[in-house]
Amino acid sequence: MNILVLGASGFIGSTFCSHAVSKGENILGMVRNEYIFHKMDFNRVLGSIENPPWKEIREFRPDVVINFAWDVSAGNWKDSIVPENYISTYADLFIKLFELGVSKIIGIGSALEYSPTSVPTDESCATITEDISYVKTKLMMLQRLMEISSSFGRKYVWIRPFYVYGETDKNPRIIPHAFKNFRNNEAVFFKNPHSTKDFINVSDVASAVLVAATKNAEGVINVGTGIGTKILDLAFEIASLLNIDKSLIKYDSARTSDDTHPYLVANNEKLLSLGWEQSVTLLDGLNKM
């Protein structure tokens, strides 16, 4: 299968490309940074969402396109702002790709699109109504992808990863942040110690996306382990692995949580039904950090 990967140099995108190549898939990864371009170990081409390398894409003749690219401003996810023309740029891209004969386009959403709940979240659950720019734009993108794929009679998949982590993650997410500070003998303040999250290793996300690309999958698919871990338990687990003083774990048990999703765990039955299996437990993944 020929798979065109947009955003192939990112944390999840690069992991996916390496995994897909190892499984015998034919990959063309689009990257926009020339320095990163030369470090990739799979077929790649320079380009961007605004200026795709159409000549190379036509020659490649992709069967499936996976979009990992997402351009946001600096800051936390709530404050992320995307350009005003972002959705229309992607819509034009999706249309042209389907016109080239692409059979399926896969977009990457977020578990944060769901409304808060106290039970594992399945794909039929309501989406969030809070006016958060990042989430709002993701849902707008999903809506346009659904409309365009329907107009062409083609398939779409919308992957909703839960809390992705891995040893190559350079972003200040909770797990890499805790490892970095603890290794420097610095304290970490955990804002929401009693929140429960579904942490999934990036290699398992990559394998899930490949299943969605190669199997008869369609629609929204949760990508999570189905196992919830309390943040405070995670903190003590990391501290134990590093054998550091537990006093470096800071939190206020009386503090009112400002977490929009104090419990966010996947119901992953749809993903499991496609033949996906988790290969990296949380403990194994933490040991690799």
Image (spheres, helix red, strand yellow):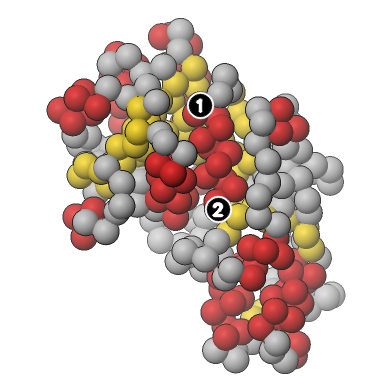
Q: Using the image, tell me which numbered label, if any, was put on residue 202.
A: 2
Depicted 51 relative to depicted 244: above or below: above
Depicted 95 relative to depicted 178: above or below: above
- Is residue 56 left or right of 255 when viewed as pictured? left
Q: Do we see residue 270 in this rendering?
A: no
Looking at the image, which residue is at 55% across and 61% down?
166
Q: Using the image, tell me which numbered label, if any, was put on residue 214.
A: 1
- Is residue 192 left or right of 212 when viewed as pictured? right
Tag 1: amino acid: Thr
The quadrant the C terminus occupies is: bottom right
- Look at the numbered disc 1 and give the secondary structure of its residue: helix
Tag 2: amino acid: Val
Q: Position of residue 228 (x, y in %)?
A: 78, 54
Q: Do we see residue 162 in this rendering?
A: yes
Other-residue count near label 2 (Cα within 10 Å), few / some / many at <14 / 14–19 / ≥20: many
Looking at the image, which residue is at 27% across and 59% down?
39
